[in-house]
Every structure is written in structure tokens, then in C-alpha cells.
Image (cartoon, rainbow, N blue to C red):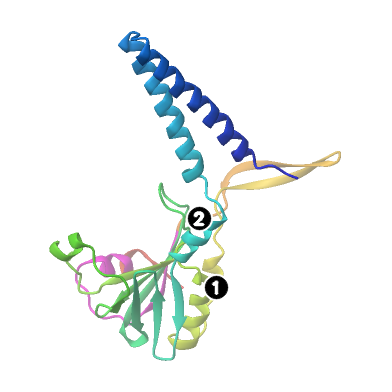
Amino acid sequence: MKINPIIIFNIFITIFLIIAIMVIVLMVKNEMNLYYISAAFMVSFLLIFILYTINKGIPNSNQEKESHQYKAKLLYHQDYFTIVTYTQDLIINWRDIEAIFFINSPPLDGEYHTMEYRIFLNKKPETVRKQPLKWYDKILPEPKQEKFPMIKIDDHYHIDFNTFHPSLEKFLLTEKISSDFLNGKFGNEVKYTQKGNKTIGIPYNKQLKTTGFYKIFDKGAYANSGSLKEYREQATEI
């Protein structure tokens, strides 16, 4: 039977923690120097912190299921599509979409996605809340909205990300577009050579892919300022 190494590590840390607590009790009873008692407290605190980090910081299958629960799903209909999240649903009418842009790039610090659709709308999407607002959301003013509000769909948070492109072709676009923009790779080009029974990869300085920024769809409504104007100026049309 295979034993989980985390369980063994937990047992050892717990034993050391019990010993540290017993030492603290003996020190207090014998009225030892406060410096030594404080040091023992710090050791105990460190052991508790390690236990907490091991058991909360390493995801198990239940935690993975829970994190999956909080990801968004995409549901498509003839006249609209819905972004379903744990707290609310966003209903976006196809005819309310002004423009769609696509960005592919290596993830920044704190991010997990490499591909993202940025969708500009003619008006705010309909919101169906499933959870009550937090008290601070009720008292804080809403952030200022641009003329063309934007929503994002990325390949980490939205579990149906790969269904969005074919759905665009089915419900919005008048003609099919190449899906090559979805095949971004990042890193350096690698040349593989055979040495005996081993295959060795040698990286070159040539990058496989740099950041891509593409315009997928645009109705062309006038925008003299804001993000939509900037995106139109910078994006490559497919």
C-alpha cells in the first residue's frame, strides 16, 4: 500500500510540535529565562505554520473540485450567450456585441491564462445575481463605465473557452475565419538531436511566438476615445 508522504510529514511535524509544547510547559514551571521561553514559542508557531501551509497550500482532489466549481461556463443560444459563474450570470445578446479582439501572450505574474477574448458591447450585459452583494459592494460607488463596456473570456477561468470560436462562426460571424490565432506557443525554438539512445533538445534564441493581438469582429461604430479606439489602432485584422 502506497503511503502519502504528506501524511508522514504531518506526523513528524506534529510530534515535534507536541515536544515543543511540553518544553514550553517545563520552562514556565521552572521559571526559566523569558528569552528561552520566547524562542520555544517561536519554534512552536513555526511548526504550526508549516502544518497549516502543508494542508491548506497543497490542493487535494476536493479542493480541485471546489476550485472547478468557481470557474465560469459558457452557454450558447440563437440570440444570446450566457457566462455562468458561481455568484452571477451574465447574459450577452449577440446583437449587442460591437467588437471582439483576441490576445495571446505568456501569462504575467499572478495570471494563469495565455489566451483571452476581449469583447466590447454597446451596453452593459444583463446580470442575474445568485449571491447577495457584500456589504462593501452596497456602499461603494460603481466604477465608471466606458461607452463600450468590455467583458473577458480566457482559457483558464472559462472551462468552455474552446467552444467560443465555433460559436462565433455559428451565431455572429457571416463567414468563417481561420483559427490559427488559437495555436500560440511560447518559448525558444528547439532543435532535437539523437545521441545514442537519448534525444537531446538544444534551444535557440529564436522565439517560437511573440504576443499576438488580433481583431476578430468589429461593427465599426465611432469611438473617439477609450479602450475600443486604442484596440482598433493596435490590433492586427484577421
Residue 27: image quadrant is top left
What range is drawn magenta here? 212-231
Residue 86: image quadrant is bottom left
Q: Residue at x 57, y 56 (%)?
A: 61
Q: Is residue 21 above or below residue 33?
A: below
| Residue 159 on image: x %, y % | 50, 68
| Residue 53 on image: x %, y % | 46, 39
Q: Which mark is residue 179?
A: 1
Query: In the image shown, does 68 or 148 lie closer to the viewer?
Result: 68
| Residue 228 on image: x %, y % | 28, 70
Query: In the image shown, does 174 or 67 lie closer to the viewer?
Result: 67
Asked whether residue 174 is drawn in magenta, I would say: no
Mark 1 surroundings: few (<14), some (14-19) or many (≥20) residues within 10 A: few
Q: Earlier in the sequence, mark 2 or mark 1?
A: 2
Tell me if 127 is positioned left or right of 144 in this view: right
Residue at the farthest bottom position: 78
Q: Is residue 209 above or below residue 130?
A: above
Q: Residue at x 39, y 80 (%)?
A: 82
Residue annotated with mark 2: 63
Residue at the farthest right position: 196
Residue 220: image quadrant is bottom left
Q: Which mark is residue 231?
A: none
Q: Residue at x 53, y 57 (%)?
A: 62
Asked whether residue 226 is drawn in magenta, I would say: yes
Tag in front: 2 or 1: 2
Asked whether residue 58 appears in the rendered view, the answer is yes
Asked whether residue 155 appears in the rendered view, the answer is no
